[in-house]
Image (cartoon, rainbow, N blue to C red):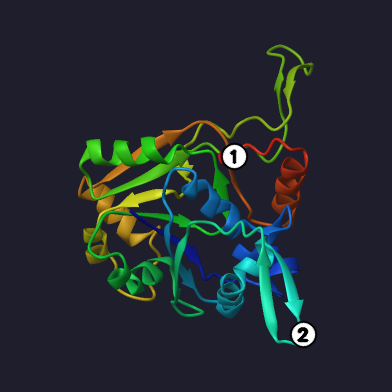
């Protein structure tokens, strides 16, 4: 099964990094967050990727073109114009990089890669979110539901601490530091989709999260796979720093690979 990753957005809310490189190439633990996302899927045997490039997409292409230089020890013999690779730790990945336009919306990017999914069921996610979703369980759930689309529903961590006031006075009765959301489920990405979802996308200006998902829901063709464990979106520089802290601690929850 192929995995499609949306990696073409401008990333304006993390402009400290995205002025220099596309958001999926922002690094956590000296690796692009795109690499982390691919490692999550690869841990479940999903190694065939289609990456929707856009803004500064050439940097993503250059990264994979020189991937072995990033992952192996090498000796350059300048005089003899030769290269010797030592201890190559390259991943078992097949990566298709598609230029889907700088300003194309998410739905349009998906529509543009229709020819690369071979008319088969495929996975889809965003290029800025990590989670410890069990992909095998997600795919099995999608198949058991029999609908055209399944999204992973998550409850993101709260941005602020909360407290409970006493009923009869102003005493703070309890305090919780950044509780898990407000009880609402949101779209966490990590979709499993049937090729028929292309019929719900009009063109480049279509945002997949709006008309297509709403219409799929109205047609009873959208399922939600509840994921109550770790999920985090790198929306801004604070989020990037939080992920870096988790990775540096040696206990990153999304590291589901060995």
Residue 102 tag number: none
Q: Which of 64 and 141 is in front in this view?
A: 64
Residue sitting at 27 percent across and 54 percent down?
Answer: 121
Label 2 and label 1: CA atoms lie apart by 36 Å
Among the two numbered marks 2 and 1 on one chain, the one whose residue lies closer to the N terminus:
2
Element assignment for label 2: loop
- The reply to whether residue 11 is in sight is no
Mark 2 or 1, closer to the camera: 2
Residue 258 tag number: 1
Q: In which quarter of the image is the C terminus?
A: top right
Contact? badges 2 and 1 (CB < 8 Å): no
At label 1, counting other C-alpha atoms closer than 10 Å, the crowd grade (few under 14, some 14-19, many 20 or more) is few
Q: Position of residue 140 (x, y in %)?
A: 30, 37
Q: In this view, does 171 lie to the left or right of 124?
A: right
Residue sitting at 61 percent across and 41 percent down?
Answer: 255
Location of mark 2 (residue): 78
User: How many numbered discs?
Assistant: 2
Element assignment for label 1: loop
At label 2, counting other C-alpha atoms closer than 10 Å, the crowd grade (few under 14, some 14-19, many 20 or more) is few
Residue sitting at 60 percent across and 63 percent down?
Answer: 24
Q: Position of residue 43 (x, y in %)?
A: 49, 44
Quarter of the rendering containing residue 170: top right
Q: Nearer the viewer, residue 68 or 8?
A: 68
Q: Where is residue 219 in the image (x, y as percent from the top left)?
A: 20, 49
Q: In this view, does 53 lie to the left or right of 181?
A: left
- The reply to whether residue 49 is in sight is yes
Quarter of the rendering containing residue 111: bottom left
Residue sitting at 44 percent across and 43 percent down?
Answer: 44
Q: Where is residue 70 in the image (x, y as percent from the top left)?
A: 68, 65
Q: In this view, does 79 lie above or below 68?
A: below
Q: Nearer the viewer, residue 89 or 191?
A: 89
């Amino acid at each position: 099964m192929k995995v499609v990753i949306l990696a073409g957005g401008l990333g304006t809310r993390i402009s400290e990094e995205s002025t220099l490189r596309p958001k999926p190439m922002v690094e956590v633990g000296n690796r692009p967050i795109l690499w982390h996302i691919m490692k999550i899927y690869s841990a479940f045997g999903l190694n065939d990727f289609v990456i929707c490039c856009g803004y500064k997409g050439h940097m993503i292409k250059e990264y994979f073109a020189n991937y072995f230089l990033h992952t192996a020890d090498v000796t350059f013999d300048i005089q003899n114009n030769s290269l010797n690779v030592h201890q190559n730790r390259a991943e078992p990945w097949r990566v298709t990089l598609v230029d889907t336009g700088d300003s194309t919306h998410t739905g349009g990017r998906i529509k543009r890669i229709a020819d690369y999914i071979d008319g088969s069921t495929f996975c889809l996610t965003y290029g800025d979110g990590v989670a410890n979703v069990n992909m095998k369980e997600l795919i099995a759930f999608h198949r058991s539901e029999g609908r055209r689309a399944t999204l992973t529903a998550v409850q993101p961590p709260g941005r602020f601490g909360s407290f409970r006031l006493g009923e009869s006075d102003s005493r703070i009765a309890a305090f919780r530091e950044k509780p898990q959301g407000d009880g609402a489920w949101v779209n966490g990405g990590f979709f499993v989709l049937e090729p028929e979802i292309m019929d719900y996308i009009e063109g480049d200006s279509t945002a997949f999260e709006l008309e297509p998902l709403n219409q799929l829901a109205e047609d009873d063709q959208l399922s939600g796979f509840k994921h109550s464990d770790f999920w985090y979106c790198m929306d801004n520089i604070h989020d990037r720093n939080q992920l870096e802290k988790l990775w540096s601690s040696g206990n990153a929850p999304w590291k589901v690979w060995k």
